[in-house]
Image: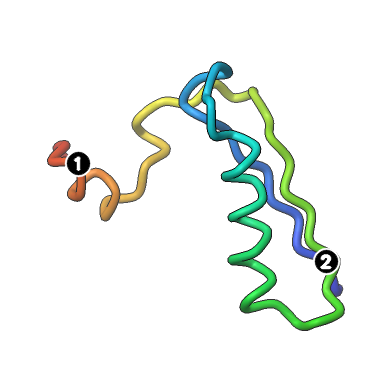
Amino acid sequence: DNEVNVEMTMTTAACPVAESLVEQSKAAIAAIAPPDAKIEVTLVWEPIWNPSMMSGVAKEFFGWPG
């Protein structure tokens, strides 16, 4: 009810900015969530990331076919 739980993955387990992206994600969610919301962002590795997980906007940004 008052929780936001996000599972996210990186394009590679060797991503050097994974932890900072987790913190940035928490901050972005906190900016729009109720002040007392419990926010949890967890890195997961299953399923393995692939380009089909990208939004159309992200693919367009990188010039990839939609």
Q: Where is residue 54 in the image (x, y as percent from the top left)?
A: 37, 42
- Residue 8's x, y, as percent? 61, 40
Q: Which of 47 and 23 is in front in this view?
A: 23
Q: Relative to 49, is 4 on the left or the right?
A: right
Question: Dividing the image into 4 quarters, which one contains the N terminus?
Answer: bottom right
Location of the C terminus by quadrant is: top left
Reply above or below: 20 against 17: below
Kindly indicate whether the residue at mark 2 contacts the one at mark 1 (C-beta within 8 angstroms). no
Residue at the extreme bottom of the image, as rendered: 34
Residue 51 appears left or right of 15: left
Task: Decide which of tag 1 and tag 2 comes sooner along the chain.
Answer: 2
Q: Give SS at disc 2.
A: strand
The amino acid marked with disc number 2 is Glu
**What colour scheme was applied to this rendering of the protein?**
rainbow
Q: Is residue 36 left or right of residue 59?
A: right
Residue at (36%, 34%) from the top-left corner? 52
Question: In percent of the image, x 52 and y 24: which residue is there?
Answer: 15
Say above or below: 63 vs 5: above
Q: In this view, does 8 lie to the left or right of 52?
A: right
Q: Which mark is drawn over residue 48?
A: none
Q: What residue is pinned by disc 1?
A: 62
Q: Position of residue 16 (x, y in %)?
A: 53, 26
Task: Count every numbered label the image shows and give the total.
Answer: 2
How packed mark 1 is, by other alpha carbons closer than 10 Å (few <14, some 14-19, many 20 or more), is few
The quadrant in which residue 65 appears is top left
Q: Mark 2 points at which residue?
A: 3
Which mark is in front, 1 or 2? 1
